[in-house]
Amino acid sequence: MRSPILFLLSLCASVAAQQPQVPEIQYQSAQDFIKLPPDMYLGEVAGVAVNSQNHVFVLSRGNSTGPAYGASAAQLLEFAADGKFLREIGRNLYAWSFAHSVKIDKDDNIWVADKGSDMVIKFTPEGRVAMVFGRKQEASDESTAPLKHLKPPLPAVEGMFRQVTDVAWDSSGNAYISDGYINSRVAKVDKKGNWVTSWGEPGGEPGQFMTPHSIAVDAEDRIYVADRGNRRIQIFDVKGKFLRQITIDVPFDPDAKPAIGNKPTSPITGNQAQAPGAPWAICITPPPHQILYSSDGYPGRIYKLSLDGKVLGVLGESGKQPKQFGWIHEMACPSENVLFVAELLNWRVQKLILEPSH
């Protein structure tokens, strides 16, 4: 007769074997999709977005000017649906400092979050500045300098940001801004630009954040916040009420190499930005059948999820070759099987074509 302990271990192994495996999604990559003019170069690609005409907008830490340390690095470029370069938007704009994300709203307005200037800029489809949010530090102020990450941080100020990260909109045109590395909150402004409210503070409890890094809104006006440092996606209603959270736990090769730096040690305590499954970038596909995509920095994968948090598939790994990723910082998902991914470390945008799920 087998001992109770051996029987229990056998039963656990049997149950584990019956657990459904997360499918590996097959896909192709067009890493040279965008065509730059001969005298133009990308830096770290912080953002990518697609409008209703399938034009691709790339926010790069290129066109860098200034001293070796603290140089401004932000450039917004537009490409046609076939990848042909069309124009640069906002050249030498006052808000350009350190690019973080670009998004396109339902009216094809172009919104940029600049982490260095603490500003969000709304451009018209023609590329003219329509609204500005936040305020850059004055160059003439003797205290102007990189922001300090004080603990605890200074109180947040209405209408102002500290290292802002991203923006998304609900069906009424309200904008939700993830404010970001220091304030650790979500701000809400209405379609006229009026400040409505904000919620969140640094921490690990529901409704608190450790670097809200990316944000998206589904067709039911639920707000999804990539709480990167806490390795979770938090979901709220339009009033900031916490609804639930999603964590991504998918087995990975323990020998997987990071895109850069030392392999994260386990367990990771404190800031979990480099932990497997920590959401660096999220995007939601258009209705009626919406899919949530999330990417991590290590082991460098993209996860396909249902809106209730079920992992439907996984793809990718860290590296420098096509179909590998070097810190995906933003994604655009115009459809379930087409993704555009912006990579910091590889200075590029890849267009991914996923094989349909069966």
Image (cartoon, rainbow, N blue to C red):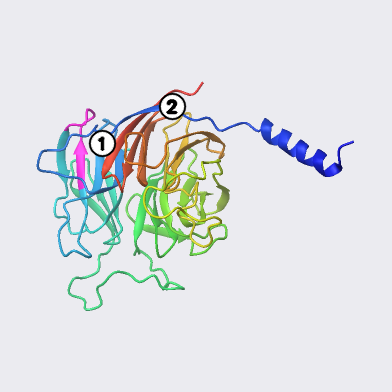
Q: Residues within 10 Å of mark 1 (few under 14, many from 20)?
A: many
Checking the image for residue 56, the label placed there is: 1
User: Going by the image, does 330 lie left or right of 252?
Assistant: left
**Is residue 80 part of the magenta span, yes or no?**
yes
Q: Residue at 25% across / 77% down in the picture? A: 143
What residue do we see at 44% from left, 47% from top? Answer: 298
Mark 2 / mark 1, whichever is N-terminal: 2
The percent coordinates of residue 250 (x first, y second) are: 55, 41
Quarter of the figure with residue 30:
top left
Q: Which is nearer the eye, 27 or 225? A: 27
**In terms of secondary structure, where does tag 2 sit?**
loop
Q: Residue 20 location, x and y as percent?
A: 62, 31
Q: Residue tagged by mark 2?
A: 26
Q: Nearer the viewer, mark 2 or mark 1?
A: 2
For residue 267, above or below residue 328: below
Q: Position of residue 103 (x, y in %)?
A: 32, 44
Q: Secondary structure at mark 1?
A: strand
Quadrant position of residue 83: top left
Amino acid type, mark 1: Val
| Left or right: residue 128 compared with residue 245 | left
Q: Are marks 2 and 1 in contact (CB under 8 Å)?
A: no
| Mark 2 surroundings within 10 Å by alpha-carbon count, few (fewer than 14), some (14 through 19), many (20 or more) | some
Kindly identify the residue that appears in the image at 39 percent across and 45 percent down: 169
Residue located 47% across and 47% down the image: 223
Q: Does the magenta portion include 268? A: no
Task: Report the amino acid beneath label 2.
Answer: Gln
Range drawn in magenta: 76-84
Q: Is residue 47 above or below residue 73?
A: above
Instruction: Determine if residue 294 is in view.
Output: yes
Going by the image, does 245 lie left or right of 173?
right
Outermost residue toward the top in this view: 358
The answer to which of 130 and 134 lies nearer the viewer is 134
